[in-house]
C-alpha cells in the first residue's frame, strides 16, 4: 500500500485518489455538508464519480505530481476523507482543501492530514505560499484554516460561481 506518493501521519495515510475510490468519492461528494459548503458536483452514481476522478483529479496529478488524496485511517483501513492541494482556477497559488465523512469529523483527522500536506508542500515541493477557500458560513473550515496558520485575506468569487467566498492565505517563507 505504501508508495512514494503516499504520505503518512501518526494515524493516517494520504494517497492520491484513483478510480478505485469512486464509490467513496460518490459518498463524500453527496454528504449534506459537502453539498452545502462545497457545492453539488452532480454525481448521481458511482460511474459519475469515476468520470470526475478521470477528468478532474487525475490530470492535475499527472501534470503536477499531486492532487486530491483519499485519507485512510491506519487503524482499520477506513476511507474517512479527502485532503489535497489544488491548482484551482480563480485562486492564485495552490489551494488546500479537505472534507471528511460526518462520522470522522471533530477528531483531529482534518488537521492532521492538512498539516502533513502543508509540510510536504514546503519541504518537498518548495511551495511557500498557500491559499484556502471556504464559504462564509462554514465556520469549522475557517477555524481549521486558521489553526493551520492561514489568515483571512478577503473575499473572492470563483469563475462560474454566484457567491463570494472567503480567501485565506499563508505566506510561508523558506526560513520557516
Image (spheres, rainbow, N blue to C red):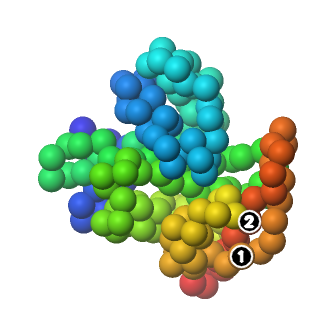
Judge from the rendering whether residue 166 lies leftward or rightward of residue 2; answer left or right.
right
Q: Which residue is disc 1 drawn over?
A: 152
Residue designated by label 2: 167
Classify mark 1: helix, strand or loop: strand
Residue 144 lies, in percent from the top left, at: 51, 71
Q: How packed is label 1: few (under 14 Cα within 10 Å), some, or many (20 or more)?
A: some
Residue extending furthest toward the left: 75
Precedes in sequence: disc 2 or disc 1? 1
Residue 18 x %, y %: 43, 29
Give SS at disc 2. Answer: strand
Q: Residue at x 83, y 45 (%)?
A: 162
Q: Nearer the viewer, residue 172 or 50?
A: 50
Instruction: Please indicate, yes or no, whether residue 65 appears anywhere in the rendered image.
Output: no
Tag shown at residue 163: none
Name of the residue lying farthest toward the bottom = 175
Residue at figure coordinates x 60%, y 84% from the top left: 175
Drawn side of residue 16 relative to residue 80, left or right = right
In depth, the one of 23 and 163 nearer the eye is: 163
Q: Quadrant of the C terminus?
A: bottom right
| Residues tagged 2 and 1 counted as in contact (Cβ below 8 A) | yes
Distance from Cα at disc 2 to Cα at disc 1:
6 Å
Query: Which of the two residues, 30 or 46, is positioned nearer the viewer here?
Result: 30
Q: Residue furthest top?
A: 47
Q: Check the picture and name the quadrant holding the N terminus.
A: top left
**Mark 2 surroundings within 10 Å by alpha-carbon count, few (fewer than 14), some (14 through 19), many (20 or more):** many
Name the side, left or right, on which 125 lies relative to 82.
right
- Closest to the observer, 10 or 120: 10
Could you say where residue 143 lies in the image, as x and y percent from the top left? 54, 74
* Looking at the image, residue 78 lies above or below residue 155: above
Q: Residue at x 49, y 35 (%)?
A: 30
- Picture coordinates of residue 5 (x, y %)? 41, 45
Q: Quadrant of residue 63?
A: top right
Amino acid at each position: 500500500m505504501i508508495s512514494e506518493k503516499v504520505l503518512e501521519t501518526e494515524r493516517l495515510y494520504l494517497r492520491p485518489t484513483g478510480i478505485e475510490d469512486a464509490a467513496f468519492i460518490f459518498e463524500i461528494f453527496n454528504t449534506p455538508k459537502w453539498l452545502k459548503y462545497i457545492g453539488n458536483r452532480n454525481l448521481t452514481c458511482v460511474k459519475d464519480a469515476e468520470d470526475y476522478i478521470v477528468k478532474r483529479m487525475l490530470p492535475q496529478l499527472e501534470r503536477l505530481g499531486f492532487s486530491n488524496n483519499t485519507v485512510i485511517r491506519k487503524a482499520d483501513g477506513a476511507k474517512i476523507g479527502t485532503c489535497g492541494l489544488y491548482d484551482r482556477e480563480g485562486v492564485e497559488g495552490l489551494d488546500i482543501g479537505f472534507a471528511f465523512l460526518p462520522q470522522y469529523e471533530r477528531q483531529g483527522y482534518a488537521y492532521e492530514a492538512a498539516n502533513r500536506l502543508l509540510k510536504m508542500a514546503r519541504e518537498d515541493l518548495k511551495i511557500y505560499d498557500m491559499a484556502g477557500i471556504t464559504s462564509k458560513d462554514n465556520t469549522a473550515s475557517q477555524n481549521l484554516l486558521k489553526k493551520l496558520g492561514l489568515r483571512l485575506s478577503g473575499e473572492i468569487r470563483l469563475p462560474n460561481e454566484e457567491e463570494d467566498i472567503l480567501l485565506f492565505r499563508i505566506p510561508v517563507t523558506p526560513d520557516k
